[in-house]
Amino acid sequence: MTDTAPAKNIATLSKLLKLSDSQYRLYDIGRLVSKLPKEQFEKVELNQLPYPTPVQGCACIAIAFWQKKSSQPYLWLLKLPLDEHGLLNQGARNHFIAIIVEALGDDLTQETSKKQEELLSSNPYLFTPAQYKLASLNSKIKVDLKQQPSQYFSPFKQYLSNTSGWSNWQDVGVQGITDFIARIKQDNHSELLINALPHLPDEVLSPVCSALENEQYPVALIDALINLFTSSLENTTTNAKSAQLLRAVAASSHHIHIKNMVEKLLGTPQVSTELLITLSSRCWQVLADKNILMCYFEHLLSNNDLTLFSSIFKDLVTIPLMRPIALGCIRSENRSPALAQAIGQLFSQT
């Protein structure tokens, strides 16, 4: 930053990064780990758009930035509050910028002193996401910056080839899994995973599904996961495995094959609470259809758990994609008596 651009004139994070002459990438790290286009984020910062994927009233954002002379990015992990309309809280964003400028001045990538470290570490808008999210984020950044994967990548790829047996998974690292999944469209990776999926022990399948939820991948892999999910439902003791497999298709949940799968699921007499929560928290895109969402709401109410219905409904209406559809459902003339009663109780509490 120069004398002609004092801190008080830095109105947005986007401007702060540009004035510091940094290259940068933005990622949403709330519900899923996904790229956040710069143009979209600039509109969010100007309150021209609500934040697309809020979590508990906040925008969870990762900013990877670096100087042209350095290929090693710095990372900010931010949790910024949103208002009741999903718009960015300008005061909180400005406060974050002020803390950064006071600590680092015009060089965001400088070596920090102890005093600067203390100032930065007390920043109330920084947070630490779950480890599996950090692993996926790290892998995505490496792919985007065309950097080599971690040392754990090759061992996991070797494991998927089943040269030493499926039970020998102890040396498989989560970072190797996310590095592989982040490169799922490269080489023969998708085919390798498809062949391995039916054989993976739960200790490996679980982190694989957690990594897959953040990626879009070829339809052949989508279909393989659908087949595994359908098979898992036939065993009533594997609700946890079914939920993991449902998580795995999260980033592809807008796909017609996933839509057909969920319609069949919701067409059954009973759906576990775990699967219902997974659908709304991670696969909300598949619920962006009035008929599917109406059916989903009926399943939520089938156990007379109004607390669960209330929390999920309130969460869904904060997502800009879902808000008009959810509100359309509760106003529908075709809503069931149970849904009408639940909505009545929901609004009587507010």
Image: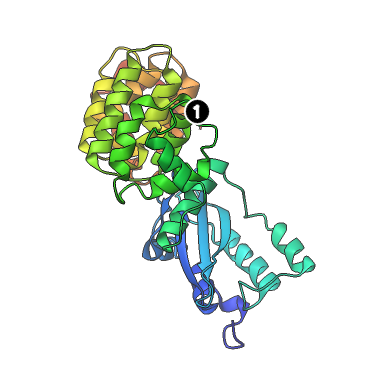
Q: Secondary structure at mark 1?
A: helix
Q: Residues within 10 Å of mark 1 (few under 14, many from 20)?
A: few
Residue 53 appears in view: no
- Please identify the residue farthest to the bottom as the structure is shown: 4
Q: Nearer the viewer, residue 96 or 294?
A: 96
Q: How far from the left and from the top, in percent, is residue 9? A: 56, 78
Q: Nearer the viewer, residue 340 or 189?
A: 189
Residue 165 appears in view: yes
Q: Is residue 27 above or below residue 201?
A: below
The residue depicted at 39 percent of the width and 62 percent of the height is 48
Hey, what amino acid is under mark 1? Glu
In this figure, what is the number of numbered marks? 1
- Please identify the residue farthest to the right as the structure is shown: 115
Q: Is residue 189 above or below residue 306?
A: below
**What residue is pinned by disc 1?**
203
Q: Is residue 132 above or below residue 93?
A: above
Colouring: rainbow
Viewport quadrant of the N terminus: bottom right
Q: How far from the left and from the top, in percent, is residue 317? A: 40, 39
The residue depicted at 23 percent of the width and 40 percent of the height is 219
Q: Nearer the viewer, residue 168 or 65?
A: 168
The residue depicted at 47 percent of the width and 35 percent of the height is 207
Q: How far from the left and from the top, in percent, is residue 24? A: 47, 67
The residue depicted at 45 percent of the width and 48 percent of the height is 179
Q: How far from the left and from the top, in percent, is residue 105? A: 66, 76
In the figure, residue 107 lies in which quadrant? bottom right
